[in-house]
């Protein structure tokens, strides 16, 4: 159906050159509090030419309340760019889907450079 999207999406921008971070492997996990607080895999993706993963989850996927972790494999990205001096081999962003907010859309932008990163809740 047109207009539907994954309930969780992400975007990588290489702020050192002002371009999208393409081909960055992304993993989404959820904290399983019933299993000794182990992380359970939910989805995997790869950023596209615009630095986005808009199809991480099927649009019909229903989020559940809990703690989620998105991992960006930045070492693979930097290696593909020919960058050998970087500080963060991966970036993990942990966020919560609060009770009553399961139907909201969650967009996780990552602004990345070899020695720093920042994130915020996007729309």
Image: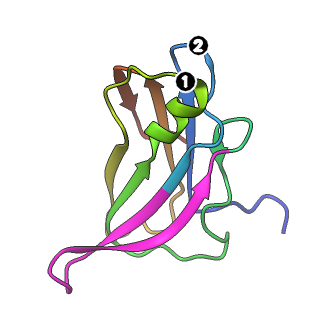
Classify mark 1: residues with Cα within 10 Å, few (<14), some (14-19) or many (20+).
some
Classify 86 as above or below 50: above
Q: Nearer the viewer, residue 79 or 19?
A: 79
What label does residue 14 carry, if any?
A: 1
Q: Residue furthest top?
A: 17
How many callouts does the rendering have?
2
Residue 12, image x and y in percent?
Answer: 55, 35
Residue 70, image x and y in percent?
Answer: 41, 54
Give the residues drawn in magenta, as a range: 27-47
What label does residue 17 carry, if any?
A: 2
Residue 20, image x and y in percent?
Answer: 64, 28
Res 30 → quadrant: bottom left
The C terminus appears in which quarter of the rendering? top right
Badge 2 marks a residue whose secondary structure is: loop
Classify 101 as above or below 19: below
Magenta span contains residue 83: no
């Amino acid at each position: 159906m047109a207009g539907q999207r994954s309930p969780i999406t992400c975007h990588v921008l290489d702020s050192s050159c002002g371009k999208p971070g393409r081909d960055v492997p992304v993993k989404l996990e959820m904290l399983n509090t019933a299993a000794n607080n182990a992380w359970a895999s939910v989805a995997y993706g790869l950023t596209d030419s615009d630095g986005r993963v808009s199809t991480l989850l099927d649009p019909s996927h229903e989020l559940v309340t809990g703690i989620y972790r998105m991992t960006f494999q930045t070492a693979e990205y930097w290696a593909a760019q020919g960058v050998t001096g970087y500080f963060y081999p991966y970036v993990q962003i942990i966020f919560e889907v609060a009770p009553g907010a399961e139907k909201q859309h969650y967009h996780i932008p990552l602004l990345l450079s070899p020695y720093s990163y920042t994130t915020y809740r996007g729309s």
